Amino acid sequence: MSAHELANCVCRTLRENGHQAYLVGGCVRDLVLGREPADYDVATDAKPDEVQRLFPRSLPVGAQFGVVVVTEDSAQVEVATFRSDVGYSDGRHPDRVEYSKRAQDDVLRRDFTINALLMDPETNEVLDFVGGREDLRTGIVRAIGDAGQRFEEDKLRMMRAVRFAARFCYAIEASTFSAIRRLAPHIRQVSAERVRDELTKMLTEGAARRAFELLDESGLLVQVLPEIARMKRVEQPPQFHPEGDVWVHTLMMIEHLKAGCSPTLAWGVLLHDVGKPPTFKPPLGPNGRIRFDEHVEVGTRMAIEICRRLRFSNEDTDQIAALVANHLRFKDVLQMKPSTLKRFVRLHRFEEHLELHRLDCTASHGHLENYEFVRRFLAETPPEEVHPARVLTGDDLKTMGFKPGPAYKEILGAVEDAQLNGKIRSREEAVAFVNEEFASLLG
């Protein structure tokens, strides 16, 4: 059963038991726009205990706020009781809720008019109490009621306004945008995890450039990612970066991130030049040029700090840091020894490194020769040559008379290098190589 089918089933069951029930929120917005919703929500006058009685396999994930999740197979639908929210002491959750029998009361507590539409699943009639259909028609993101109050209730709504505006190519209504600019410093009260997830959605929904331009214009960027805000007006050598400063270059790269791309790739792209502002050195003398000495090393450390601040997992942090640390290595691929090149393309999730390099080139000088070289190498090189089977082990070295110790790592590394360079293809050749190259270590 799909989520859409489950949502219709939930509405039908609730109505058959004497309750009101409507599809609500983002799913209605997407249906009106002719898009396929990612998930479905239902609003009803049935209280949580009644919803749980009618759907025994439901989960009371937010029953204190009137929210129950109904599951069936792999599908799930969030069912919320009509309510008014009273007080938001923590800036996210209501202090208490007051249940209602009127759908009008429920939509008034929501964030934006375009997310406050209701739909009768039987007739597809849309109920609109806040002007959401007109805002969809004219392309406006507008807070419901007083924008400042909506954002004080949940500060993350400021970032959601930016994301929706970017995702749908809408404008943010003037008073809503003014409230965001006024309250932008309050975004620091939101948990790092929620900010991270919202930024990741902006980067991976196919409208990253517009999202980050709006973050900057609204004053939110300097609050959540001051390191990115510092990229503005940091000049680059025009012979390598005719497009402009580090900020423009980064915007051009994220502009070409495809919808649904890997989050780690997106963050690697965003942060790949984060070390340039603190390492900027102006040209010295008439023939000098702008330099960013050690910007890769500095940027890698900064990327790790940002990932830790935003509570990324260790695995994602490692991958994002690796993307930053290795992004300049592509300039050397034509001169790399076979062993070095093979080790390079063995990097974890190398396809992300390769795509970051393509975007980097496309958003600057436009030269893709090294990118195409690596692609051909990967296509033409058998996997067993990139990942050769080990021909010697530590036990073999011991049998050959080498004393166990740190030298084992050096010897086995040299053997693998010889394999990768095509000098060794068998165990017998490896034994001969070690006896010749490391004879001084025997005994």
Image (spheres, rainbow, N blue to C red):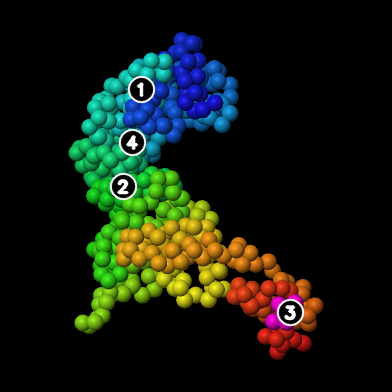
Q: Amino acid at mark 3?
A: Val
Q: Is residue 270 magenta?
A: no
Tally of numbered tags: 4
Whole-number angstrom distance, CA of label 1 to CA of label 4: 22 Å
Whole-number angstrom distance, CA of label 1 to CA of label 2: 27 Å
Q: Amino acid at mark 1?
A: Leu
Residue under the point 31% across and 74% down: 291
Residue under the point 52% across and 57% down: 349
Q: Are marks 2 and 4 in contact (CB under 8 Å)?
A: no
Instruction: Give the mark toward the camera: 1 or 4.
Output: 1
Q: Are marks 1 and 2 in contact (CB under 8 Å)?
A: no
In the figure, residue 237 lies in which quadrant?
Answer: bottom left
Q: Are marks 3 and 4 in contact (CB under 8 Å)?
A: no
Q: Which residues are magenta?
A: 428-434
Residue 153: mark in rendering: 4
User: Which is nearer the N-term, disc 1 or disc 2?
Assistant: 1
User: Which is nearer the N-term, disc 3 or disc 1?
Assistant: 1
Judging by the rendered image, the residue that carries numbered circle 1 is 118
Residue 161, image x, y percentages: 30, 40
Judging by the rendered image, the residue that carries numbered circle 2 is 211
